[in-house]
Image (cartoon, rainbow, N blue to C red):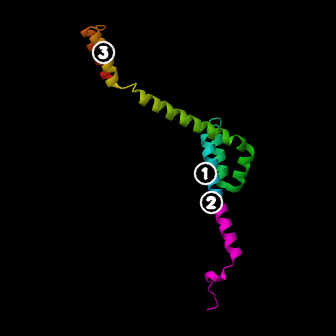
Amino acid sequence: MSDSVYLAYDYPLLGAFWTMMWVFLWILWIILLFRVLGDVFRDDDLSGWAKTGWTLFLLVLPFLGILVYLIVRGRDMGKREHQAARARQDSLDAYIRQTATGTGGHADELAKLSELKNKGDLTEAEFQHAKEKVLSS
């Protein structure tokens, strides 16, 4: 029974501070690792072999790998992140614009065809042919 039991009040305040700091730095490093791996796979300029090499380097020697990656390729990480965010926003804007205007729907095309037929611009045969095209696509 020579083992001593440490209670919470035996742990000094400075020790608690250092423990919290190391836990915070470890979580920060994990987040940085995932950011760097995401940047490796997001970059279209890297070939498949280069992506494999960086990934292996990051997994085998993680601390050194992250530091080297940030030194060598860190300058453009923000640019690539910004381009990816801009592409996602443009895609969302285009989808919203398409959905809001109602273009592309079969019902809208059929309504336009019916309107053209009612005006007399289309004959019955032309209307049926165009209607079959719309419904088959």
Name of the residue lying farthest toward the right = 71
Question: Nearer the N terminus, badge 3 or badge 2?
Answer: 2
Q: Which numbered disc, 3 or 2, marks the residue closer to the eye?
A: 3
- Left or right of residue 118, residue 58 in this image: right
Q: In the image, what residue type sits under mark 1?
A: Phe
Tell which circle, 1 or 2, labels the residue nearer the N-terminal end.
Answer: 2
Residue at 61 percent across and 86 percent down: it is: 5
Q: Is residue 77 left or right of residue 92?
A: right
Badge 3 crowding class, 10 Å Cα cut-off, few under 14, some 14 to 19, many 20 or more, is few
Is residue 17 located in the magenta-colored stretch of the structure?
yes
Q: Which residue is mark 2?
A: 27
Disc 1: which residue: 34
The answer to whether the residue labelled 1 contacts the one labelled 2, judged by CB atoms less than 8 Å apart, is no
Q: CA distance from mark 1 to mark 2?
A: 11 Å
Q: To which quarter of the image does residue 111 belong? A: top left
Residue in the image at 32% along x and 18% along y: 133
Q: Name the spot of residue 3 as percent of width and height, x first.
A: 63, 88
Of residues 31 and 82, the one nearer the viewer is 82
> Residue flagged by tag 3: what amino acid is it?
Glu
Q: Which residue is mark 3?
A: 115
As displayed, is residue 1 above or below residue 68?
below
Residue 108 picture location, percent across and down: 34, 23
Span of residues in magenta? 1-25
Per the model, the C-alpha gap separating discs 3 and 2 is: 63 Å
